[in-house]
Image (cartoon, grey):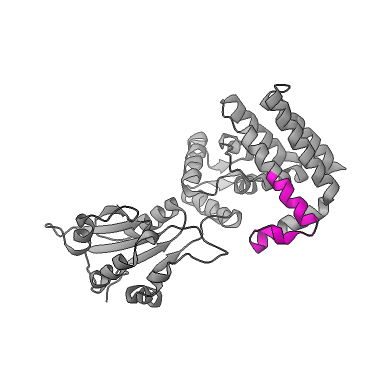
Amino acid sequence: MADRPGFLFCVCPDAELIRGHIRGLLEKRSENWRIKTFWADEELPDSFWEALSLTGILGDSAAVILRRAERLQAATWRKLSPVLCRFKPNIWPFFCIESQWSKGDPPIPAVLKKQKFFQLAEQKSWIWKSSGFNRQSLKGHLQRWAESQGRLFTGQSLALATEILPLDGAGLKNELQKIELLLGDRQQIQPEDLSVVSLQADMDSFAFLQALQSKGQKIALWKKIIRNQLDSGQDMVLPFLGLMLWESRQLWQLAAGDSGKVRLPARIKETKTRMARKLGQRKLAEIWTHVLEAETGIKSGQFSAGQAMEILISKLMLLFET
C-alpha cells in the first residue's frame, strides 16, 4: 500500500493556499519532486497526458498539477479514469478546483462527482478542502506563522493584525514578508510594526468601524496606516469610502430588520446585526452622511484626501461616543 495518495483533489478558491499545501506535502517526502503545471482553461497538450503516464528516464518523480480543473469537460474527466486507475510511485497528480464556495459548500462539479476515481478519493480522504481565509482562521494562521519564525505577537498586535491583513493568500504572504523585513532580528511583534501593512481597496471596512468603537490603540493604528499610504502616493481613500458607504447601507438594512436582503454567512451576519442594533438607524444614517461629505470634499477639491479622512475619523469617533 502506498504511503501517499495516488492522486489528490485540492478544493480551494485561493491559489496561494493551494500552492502552499502542495508544497508542504512534497517537502515532507524523501523524493525530489519536479513540478509540472498545466491549466484546464486551455486545451490540454499531449505533454499533460505524457506527464501522467510516462516515468522520466532517470526515474525522477513528478508532481503533475492541473490548475482550474473545474473547467474540464465531461469527456476529459472520463478520459482521466484509465490514467488514474493504477498507482504510479513516481507520478503524483493534483487536481485544483478553484471556484468560489457557495454558502459553505465546496464547488465540486456534478460531472466529477460521478467519476469512480473521485468516489475513491472521497473514500480514501484524498481530497483537501479549504474555503480560504476568514478573520477567525487568519488568527490561527498568524499564530502558526509567528511560531515558525520564532516570533511572538505582543499586546494587541495579534488582534490588530487579524483585522487589517488581507484575506487572500498572495497578499497576506507579501504583507508578512514586509513585517519580517521591518523586524529584522527582533522577535516581538508590536502593534506599531503593523503600520507597514498596505491598506488595500478590499480592506475590511467593518473592522474599521469596530476599531472606531474601541477607540484607543486600534484607531490610532488605522490612522497611521492611512497616513502612510497617503504619504506613499497610493490612491486608496475613495475606494475605501465606497466600501464604507456599502457597509453602512448593509448595517442600516440589518438594523431595520431587513436582514433577508443582506447575503452574508450566518456568523458574520449575527455579528453585524449586533453592531447595527447597538448603533441604531439614526447613527447609521449619520455615518452615511459623513462618508458622503468626505467623498464630496475630496472630489470638489475642498479637502485633500488626508484632510478628508482626518475629519471623517473625528466625526465618526464623536458619533460613537454619543
Using the rendered view, name the quadrant where residue 29 is placed. Answer: bottom left
Asked whether residue 225 is in view, the answer is no
Q: 196 and 77: which one is in front?
A: 77
User: Which residue: 72% across, 23% down?
Assistant: 303
Asked whether residue 193 is in view, the answer is yes
Would you say 187 lies left or right of 55 here? right
Q: In which quarter of the image is the C terminus?
A: top right
> Is residue 265 found inside the magenta-colored segment of the image?
yes
Q: At which x and y percent is residue 203? A: 61, 43
Would you say 96 lies left or right of 6 here? right
Q: At which x and y percent is residue 215? A: 76, 41
Name the magenta segment's main secondary structure. Answer: helix
Q: 101 and 200: which one is in front?
A: 101
Would you say 82 lies left or right of 17 here? left
User: Which residue: 16% across, 61% down?
Assistant: 55
- Where does the magenta region start and end? 246-269
